């Protein structure tokens, strides 16, 4: 027949996370599973809105009025509202930090749980109007013992996160998740409305052939970055130069780096003293996933996951990807003045 026999034993995200919890035995209460369920629902909802964006007036700036006189809602504001509502309603959260909100949300008593979620509801906003891949990034901490949930619970190193992930809204929606024992990728089957395990145990190749930097900032780059980029673009023969790929959505650039290898970088430079990417909800979750996939994530001189944040929206330089490639870069930081 022309039809292929369907797989009759689908591993959904929920099933996969649940089996993880069963493996952990009685110590696991199932709360993290429920929280991750809430997060996957927000991803499905955001994915739907991304797809419909052009039809239902989501493109454009918040606060603008369309020809019918209706207020337009920017996709990242909408995505933020979707996440805040769902995470609060899950009853599993205590503190929420969103790129879109100046202050952390401390969840009120009736809804309070024991997890803190830091998130970038819509990453890659400059790509929305062009229909290029965008995503959602999240990281999860458990409140410290005896804490009822304060900002201190999220001002902790990324290595203390209990889970991190992202969903990329592209030709399909892909959710990539780590709960601390490897990285798995799930693809949304739109007909089922379920994320299906399609990329079990993602591991980054130890070396890649792609570099991903916004070289439009080259005139501001510090010497180690300039020297490193020169070394991969003008290698000593018989080595071939690297290929450039830069989408400008961290989610999409990191997704490609996890699957194909290579190096993604957003350095600090003479203009952006701390770089551009946000530590809590961009650098930490992506660094967590990178390390869990066998790669390295560094500021150039120190491990990203070791940084202790002092404020929720602070920035940090980011280089991540294949072990050998990132080590090459780090050598330039050691050797170049
Ligand atoms: P956001 O859309 O959440 O503000 O994040 C944009 C970030 C990140 O996705 C990307 O890696 C970077 O900004 C791109 O910056 P440039 O346009 O400066 O290259
Ligand atoms: Mn972002
Ligand atoms: Mn964003």
Image (cartoon, rainbow, N blue to C red):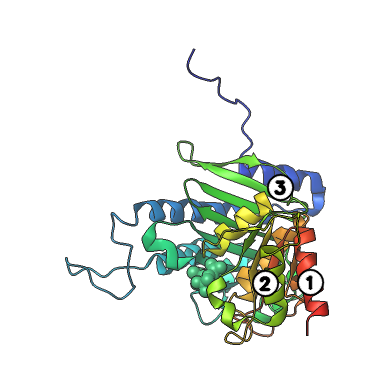
Q: With respect to residue 196, does 309 lie above or below? A: below
Where is residue 198 shown, x and y percent of the image?
A: 62, 39
Q: Residues within 10 Å of mark 2 (few under 14, many from 20)?
A: many
First of labels 2, 3 by sequence position: 3
Where is residue 337 shown, x and y percent of the image?
A: 78, 85
**Does residue 171 appear in this view?**
yes
First of labels 3, 1 by sequence position: 3
Task: Answer yes or no: disc 2 within 8 Å of ligand 1.
Answer: no
Residue 165 appears left or right of 81: right
Question: Is 203 in front, or is 268?
Answer: 268
- SS of the residue at dot 3? loop
Q: CA distance from mark 2 to mark 1?
A: 12 Å
Disc 2 designates what residue?
Answer: 318
Question: Is 274 in front, or is 149?
Answer: 274
For the point 78% across and 74% down, the residue is 332
**Does residue 81 appear in this view?**
no
Q: With respect to residue 307, does 43 lie above or below? A: above
Disc 1 designates what residue?
Answer: 330
Where is residue 123 shown, x and y percent of the image?
A: 51, 65
For the point 82% across and 79% down, the residue is 335
Disc 3 designates what residue?
Answer: 202
First of labels 2, 1 by sequence position: 2
Q: CA distance from mark 3 to mark 1?
A: 24 Å
Seen as rendered, the residue at the extreme left is 68
């Amino acid at each position: 027949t022309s039809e292929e026999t369907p797989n009759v034993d689908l591993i959904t995200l929920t099933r996969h996370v649940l089996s993880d919890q069963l493996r952990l035995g009685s110590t696991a209460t199932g709360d993290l599973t429920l929280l991750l369920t809430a997060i996957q629902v927000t991803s499905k909802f955001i994915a739907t809105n991304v797809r419909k964006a052009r039809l239902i007036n989501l493109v454009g700036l918040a606060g603008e009025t369309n020809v019918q006189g209706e207020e337009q809602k920017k996709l990242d504001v909408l995505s933020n509202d979707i996440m805040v509502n769902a995470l609060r309603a899950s009853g599993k959260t205590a503190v929420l930090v969103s790129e879109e909100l100046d202050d952390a949300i401390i969840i009120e008593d009736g809804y309070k749980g024991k997890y803190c979620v830091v998130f970038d509801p819509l990453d890659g906003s400059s790509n929305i109007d062009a229909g290029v891949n965008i995503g959602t990034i999240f990281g999860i901490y458990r409140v410290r013992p005896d804490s009822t949930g304060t900002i201190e619970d999220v001002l902790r190193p990324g290595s203390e996160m209990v889970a991190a992930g992202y969903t990329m809204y592209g030709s399909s929606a892909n959710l990539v998740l780590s709960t601390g024992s490897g990285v798995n990728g799930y693809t949304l089957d739109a007909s089922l409305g379920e994320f299906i395990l399609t990329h079990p145990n993602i591991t980054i190749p130890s070396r890649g052939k792609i570099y991903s930097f916004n070289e439009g900032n080259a005139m501001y780059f510090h010497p180690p970055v300039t020297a490193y980029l020169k070394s991969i673009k003008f290698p000593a023969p018989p080595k071939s130069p690297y290929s450039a790929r830069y989408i400008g959505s961290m989610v999409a650039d990191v997704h490609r780096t996890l699957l194909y290898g290579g190096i993604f970088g957003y350095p600090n430079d003479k203009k952006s003293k701390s770089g551009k990417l946000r530590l809590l909800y961009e650098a930490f979750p992506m660094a967590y996933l990178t390390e869990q996939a066998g790669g390295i994530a560094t500021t150039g001189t120190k491990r990203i996951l070791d940084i202790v944040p002092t404020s929720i929206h602070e920035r940090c330089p980011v280089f991540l990807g294949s072990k050998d490639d990132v080590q090459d870069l780090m050598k330039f930081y050691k050797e170049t003045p």
